[in-house]
Image (cartoon, grey):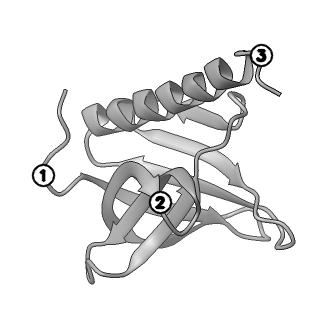
Amino acid sequence: MAAPPHGWRVKLYQLNDEGHWDDRGTGSICVAHLESLGGPGVSVASEESGSVDLLQSLIMEDREAYTLQGENIITWEERRPPAPSVDLALSFQENEGCLHIWNQIQEIQGNYATQGSSGLS
């Protein structure tokens, strides 16, 4: 299951104070090392302006942080202290893309767990 050359197409949503999901835009997603955040993360480049990122999010170690809903939605709580946390959702056009990104997140979290249990202090 290989990603398309320009990434999978997703819609980014953010939960507002009234409990409704606001559409933050459509773009292409990839999982990569994000220099600006200093580690592996999820990046969504805007479909309208490929040079503008709708999202750059460091992948969290907590396996419970991300939820797969159905076959095409991933949700999580984005925490960036001191800013308040926000609930985000990615809705994938293709189920295959959702599962591909989900598996990449799980693999990175597994690497965190392996590094943490290696006995290094």
> Relative to residue 97, is residue 23 drawn left or right?
right
Residue at position x 45%, y 73% in the image: 54
**Residue at which label 1 appears:** 5
> Relative to residue 81, is residue 32 drawn left or right?
left
Residue at position x 20%, y 41% in the image: 3
Q: Would you identify the image quadrant in which residue 47 lies?
A: bottom left
Dot 3: few (<14), some (14–19), or many (≥20) neighbours within 10 Å? Answer: few
The numbered mark at residue 119 is 3
Q: Residue type at mark 3: give it.
A: Gly
Dot 1: few (<14), some (14–19), or many (≥20) neighbours within 10 Å? Answer: few
- Position of the C terminus, as image quadrant, is top right
Residue 37, compared with residue 113, is above or below; it is below
Q: Residue type at mark 1: give it.
A: Pro
Q: For the residue labelled by badge 3, is the local secondary structure a helix, a strand or a loop?
A: loop
Q: Residue type at mark 2: give it.
A: Leu
Dot 2: few (<14), some (14–19), or many (≥20) neighbours within 10 Å? Answer: some
> Relative to residue 75, is residue 85 drawn left or right?
right
x and y percentages locating residue 50 in the rendered image: 26, 77
The numbered mark at residue 33 is none
The answer to whether marks 1 and 3 mark residues whose Cβ atoms lie closer than 8 Å is no
Which is more N-terminal, label 1 or label 2?
1
Q: In the image, which is nearer the foreground, mark 1 or mark 3?
A: 3
Q: In the image, which is nearer the foreground, mark 2 or mark 1?
A: 2
x and y percentages locating residue 32 in the rendered image: 39, 50
For the image, the number of numbered tags is 3
Q: CA distance from mark 2 to mark 1?
A: 18 Å
Q: For the residue labelled by badge 1, is the local secondary structure a helix, a strand or a loop?
A: loop
Which is more N-terminal, label 2 or label 3?
2
The numbered mark at residue 34 is 2
Q: For the residue labelled by badge 2, is the local secondary structure a helix, a strand or a loop?
A: strand
